[in-house]
Amino acid sequence: MLALVHLSTALLTDHYELTMVDAARRAGTADRGSVFELFTRRLSGARRYGVVAGTGRLLEAIDRFRFTDTELDFLKSRGVVSDGTLDWLANFRFSGNIWGYPEGEVFFPGSPLISVEASFAEGVLLETLALSVLNYDSAVATAASRMSHAAKGKPLAEMGSRRTSEYSAVAAARAAYIAGFSATSNLEAGRSYGIPTMGTAAHSFMLLHDSERAAFEAQIATLGTDTTLLVDTYDIEQGVRTAIEVAGTSLGAVRIDSGDLPVVVGRVRHLLDELGATQTRITVTNDLDEHTVAVLAASPVDSFGVGTSVAVGSGSPTMGMVYKLVAHEDEQGNWVSVAKKSAGKVSVGGRKSVYRRFNARDVAVAETIVVNDGSHATGLPGNNAAAEAVEGREILVPLVTNGEVLREHTGTDGIAAARERHRQRVAELPAVAMSLTRGDPAIPTEYV
């Protein structure tokens, strides 16, 4: 597992989360029951849908949200909070409930991706961590989902490690795999999450040897003829001829990383067939995104390697998610709905449940959000009659119950379930969802 998985996640947060806890404890409001929701007001890049990713990582991080002596000594040395709050933090364990969209699910503007039900102090402490994980992972998964559809069933490998930070690279591989990619180049992602890994040789390996032929011979001697040979270091046509001369017509694949790919791929396919290597596959790399993948999907390309674009969300590196307080208990213990009124940043108060509605052909037509629904929060008044009147699939599922993470959402089993869920949910969307142009969400969000 990653080197960080055994470390506390408590300081992966913003300074003001702790000062709010400190001030609320002094004011006597820290223990008020509260409901926080994480959502996005719009889909980044005018995408037609978003894909939830990172939920399993977040739950594992919440498990490790502990203030050990190391964290407490740091906070004390900086004078971040009072001694009384340091004592409170020393005993901190999240004890509340979290409901949310399961990983791999699709979402739309206003979708409450997680709903955190706890005391104000416990709920506010998770804000930065939840946003850090879900904003990035969901951006990668949304881009990867678009690429997966554009590829029309042809496999894609994630190769973006060198275009982001070392730990974001592992998260990106995980998110891309959930959204339909078949493999990653990142070995830590393979070790931590069981994702298939792949890779053969780069141009430096070709340039190391006295000739392209010598490089091919060295690779074949180690990896066998089912390997993939990189044929564009010098001249692509000659590279293909040399590859087949060295490996024979049973060569597994050739990789092309440069040139006018739609034209080059056609020529390479023709040449391979002419040489008798009819089963040798063609894989392409070279700064691909969903638009170039869509163009190349109609060509004789057999597989794709995507690097920079997927690791940075293909131009939308964050989903713009926010984490807001939507309800809390007052002095008398009565629940009060609260919401921001700021221009351009309006939120909708109240605990919510979500139902996806479908037409007679089982195609999604709307995301219906029932406001002030108290069915999941003890003591929270509910709009249950409205919820019962909605026909559709309920989206929110329990993720944490009384502080205990539900393990079916974590680990390799959680990833496998999320990957299958994503496949099913995207298939339920209307055709417009697959458009690569900017536009409105594929289905509307309606409030009742």
Image (cartoon, grey):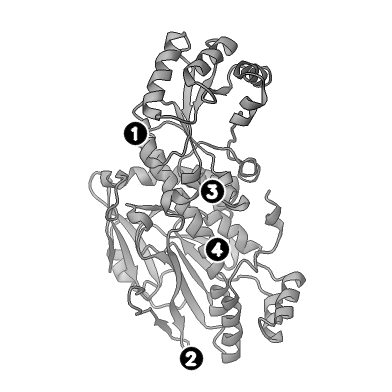
Dot 1 and dot 2 residues touching (CB under 8 Å): no
Q: Position of residue 332 (x, y in %)?
A: 47, 91
Amino acid at pointer 2: Glu
Q: CA distance from mark 2 to mark 3?
A: 44 Å
Amino acid at pointer 1: Val
Q: Position of residue 110 (x, y in %)?
A: 35, 64
Q: In the picture provided, is 44 more to the left or to the right than 21?
A: left
Whether residue 195 is visible here, answered yes or no, is yes
> Looking at the image, which residue is at 54% across and 68% down?
128
Q: Nearer the viewer, mark 1 or mark 2?
A: 1
On residue 172, the disc is 3
> Looking at the image, which residue is at 40% across and 72% down?
351
| Secondary structure category for the residue under label 4 | strand
Q: CA distance from mark 4 to mark 1?
A: 43 Å
Q: Label 4: which residue?
A: 400
Q: In the picture provided, is 225 more to the left or to the right than 264?
A: right
Dot 2 and dot 3 residues touching (CB under 8 Å): no
Q: Position of residue 281 (x, y in %)?
A: 48, 21
On residue 331, the disc is 2
Residue in the foreground of this view, choosing between 344 and 107: 344
Dot 1 and dot 3 residues touching (CB under 8 Å): no
Amino acid at pointer 4: Val
Q: CA distance from mark 1 to mark 2?
A: 61 Å
| Secondary structure category for the residue under label 1 | helix
Comes first in the chain, label 4 or label 1: 1
Q: Label 1: which residue?
A: 295
Q: Nearer the viewer, mark 4 or mark 1?
A: 1
